[in-house]
Image (cartoon, helix red, strand yellow):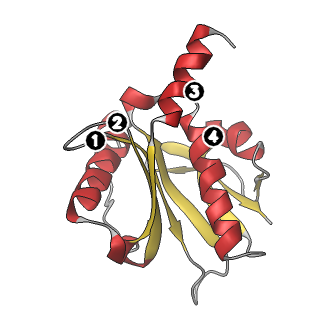
Amino acid sequence: MTELQQSAAKRLAQLDWRWKYFDELTSIEVYTMLGARSAVFVVEQNCVYGDIDGLDVDAWHLLAYGPGEKRPPLAGYLRVLLPDADDTDIRIGRVLTTAEFRGIGLGNAMLERALTHIRAQWSGTPIRLHAQAHLQGFYGAFGFAPVSEVHEEDGIPHVWMRSA
């Protein structure tokens, strides 16, 4: 293992993982979650859209925090929407890693952890996500396959992908 790989593995091992339903989140967790989503999706990707869409309150949230005493930094985040009357699939969305934690394999670790939780809690339910088109290979490695044509959303090419 190279020195860079060892450093990345060490940083991943230091993360504090939290898997919570919205009602279990603390006010600080909600604040850091919304702040990270704004920083990545609105500011970095220059995409003005209504992030607070009313879906968070009925979702599960996976948060990965870096080391820190009083207010540890949020390293990565995603939310999981459960099946409802309009959609029978579980949906993964708002997947992000913050700038400080990119390049250490956090995206892989987050998706692996999320899929483990989903399959343990809702075994056999299909899972879908709305991926940025350039990430099809990344999600494909986890068993997701495109189920739509590439289309533009908020100025960014996206594709729906699904895994059974």
Contact between labelled residues 1 and 2, with CB atoms less than 8 Å apart: yes
Label 1 vs 3, first from the N-terminus? 3
Residue 144: percent from the left, percent from the top? 76, 53
Q: Which residue is mark 2?
A: 67
Q: What residue is drawn where x is 32% and y is 67%? A: 25
The numbered dot on residue 43 is: none
Q: CA distance from mark 2 to mark 3?
A: 14 Å
Q: Which residue is mark 1?
A: 72
The numbered dot on residue 108 is: 4
**Residue 53's image quarter?**
bottom left
Question: Which quadrant is home to the N terminus?
Answer: top right
Contact between labelled residues 1 and 4, with CB atoms less than 8 Å apart: no
Amino acid type for the residue under numbered disc 4? Asn
Amino acid type for the residue under numbered disc 1? Pro
Question: Which quadrant is home to the C terminus?
Answer: bottom right
Secondary structure type for disc 3: helix
Label 4 vs 1, first from the N-terminus? 1
Residue 8: percent from the left, percent from the top? 54, 23
10 Å crowding of disc 2: few (<14), some (14-19), many (20+): some
Residue 86 lies, with reference to residue 156, above or below; the image says below
Amino acid type for the residue under numbered disc 3? Ala
Q: CA distance from mark 3 to mark 4?
A: 12 Å
Q: CA distance from mark 2 to mark 4?
A: 19 Å
The numbered dot on residue 9 is: 3
Q: CA distance from mark 4 to mark 1?
A: 21 Å
Q: Nearer the viewer, mark 2 or mark 4?
A: 2
Amino acid type for the residue under numbered disc 2? Pro
Residue 117: percent from the left, percent from the top? 62, 64
